[in-house]
Image (cartoon, grey):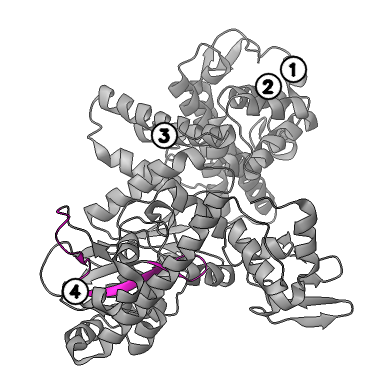
Amino acid sequence: MSLSPAWLDELRARTLLSALIGKTTKLQRAGREWKACCPFHNEKTPSFTINDEKGFYHCFGCGAHGDAIRWMTDHQGLPFIDAVKELAQSAGLEVPAQDPRAREKAERASTLHDVMGDAEAFFVEELGKAEGASARAYLKKRGITEAQARTFRIGLAPDSRTRLRSALSKWGDEKLIECGLLIQPEEAKREPYDRFRGRLMIPIRDARGRTIAFGGRILGEGEPKYLNSPETVLFDKGRTLFNLDRAAPASRKADRVIVVEGYMDVIALSGAGIDEAVAPLGTALTEGQLERLWRLDPQPILCFDGDSAGQKAAVRAIGRALPFLTPGRTLRFVTLPQGQDPDDLIRSGGRVAMEALLAEPEPLVERLWRHEQAALPLDTPEARAGLKQRLAEHARAIADKDVSHAYLSEFRQRADALFAPPRREWQPRPPQARPARGNGRGGWPPVPSQPLAGTRAVNQSGVGPLEARALLIGLARQPAVIAAHAEHLSHLHFADPALDRVRMALVEATWRGETLEGDGISTILRRVGAIELLSKQGRANGLAFSFQRGDADPERARRDLGEVIDVMVRRSELDARIAEATARLGNATDDGAWEEQLHLIRERQETERRLSELRELTGDAEL
């Protein structure tokens, strides 16, 4: 098939875009255009416009944009060729001739769709007969109403080797075998027989809603519990998702797509009003299925049972997804309570219980971290190194370099926090007992008229240049600490305006999600002129922290840097409280105000003592 640009332009010109979109979306006239609430995301005020003259739609809210063909592929979920064919049929255009082989394949597929449609009708009819009573009772037991059964076109394959073959004899055995409805024994002389017998039949449809396969659920005891159609000209198991035809438009309105384990889970969610659910067909998610999901939503929610099989399925899905992650494209996870599937949860707690879980999905990075952390004991150095190695391998499996670096950074931070020795907690020395009060205030120690030396300067002007420079050099060498302490760093204030701008640039880069590992930190520092600035800040009087040295143990450097930040934030808080207590003493003489000030001053002294302990005698450090 050869679709020239001129032919495609003619197809677009013959398609009235507003009429096409108006089939599924309520439109309002707006001058020479049409407007509507965007079908690609939830909104209350219309921001979606359609221009028939120019032949495109555009949403000013989410940025969705395209023509008639794009509408069919993005909103209806059709492959490009199917979208073109459907539009051409409506427009009265003849699709350019295919080569003989492609034309023959298309004609055969068209016929097979008719065969599958007749098979579906046969199964539905059988369910309504007297012989289908036990199947109807099973559906009732599972909480599936007659309306749901009609929606999903559930049927029954009678417990017979020839009933379907006889009912569809007009198509001939060859086509029934090609559709996977009959099995041809290896012995040529033996007659073909029905593949599905004594099973509840659930049609599997393509994105256009055409039946392409069946899933059969056994009634009573027996194996396998579920039997799917084999792969055929129509049915590619690795690229098909159950309920995709209904879930695609529903996902646009719900702004999410949910993946569950099986057919019955999808049907149960639909009964509760959650129509944006799909299921793989008895296997782990494939790359082809993931691509289809990401076309609907960049962050699909995978909902698995809480048992070991469900957790293994989640991990397999992560392994398949990692190479294809990109900024904004990921997976999220919901784990059901142990021993429950969506059907059980909805019957016990209704939609509210299910929505409560869906409202707080677990990020992929968190699920992967928990899995690897729990995989093996971590009681030896070798085991801990093994965890780090496995996590690094997962991160390196991601093709997108930015995302890969972000995962490496995240895993390093988590591992450092998990294995770091406990910090030595420092506590302010308890205030000494106050001497007995004599006449007036003569028996008390003198009340300071102002905070300790240096306190006022820090409180009013911020962290001094030497300490500020030391912190920035440490952050440049250990960028993982920035994200972990971004909140505390945002509350600090450096006395030197130029250094303070560097501090805020690092914090804001973290808030924007910029990559700080590798070349990322150098890019940010150059952007604000920090490398030259820090190199000109003079020597640190021979005193420095471990994190200023390039040869320092990384784990110790990160630990010390984090503690210095915490101590400096605490020191600033104490400076402010001391200033307030001192001001109150000027207007009051109660014992409480005096004792509070004395206690704060001693605690302030403890912060300085702890900073002194963290310093060590060394040469000055450069970037």
Q: Position of residue 25 (x, y in %)?
A: 67, 78
* Three-letter residue code for mark 1: Gln
Q: Nearer the viewer, residue 409 or 368?
A: 368
Q: CA distance from mark 2 to mark 4?
A: 89 Å
- Which picture quadrant has residue 251? bottom right
**Callout in the foreground (3, 2):** 3
* Three-letter residue code for mark 2: Leu
Which residue appears at 56% of the width and 35% of the height? 400
Local secondary structure at mark 2: helix
Q: Which residue is mark 4?
A: 162
* Three-letter residue code for mark 3: His
Q: CA distance from mark 1 to mark 3?
A: 41 Å
Q: Which residue is mark 3?
A: 394
Q: Residue furthest top?
A: 619
Cβ–Cβ under 8 Å for marks 3 and 2? no
Q: Is residue 475 visible?
A: yes
Q: Position of residue 213 (x, y in %)?
A: 36, 65
Cβ–Cβ under 8 Å for marks 1 and 4? no
Q: Nearer the viewer, residue 574 or 52?
A: 52
Q: Which residue is mark 2?
A: 466
Q: Which residues are magenta?
A: 187-212
Q: Position of residue 132 (x, y in %)?
A: 21, 86
- The first of marks 1 and 2 along the sequence is 2
Residue 285 vertical placement versus 443 (above, below): below
- The first of marks 4 and 3 along the sequence is 4
Q: Nearer the viewer, residue 245 or 389?
A: 245
Local secondary structure at mark 3: helix
Which residue appears at 81% of the width and 66% of the height? 13
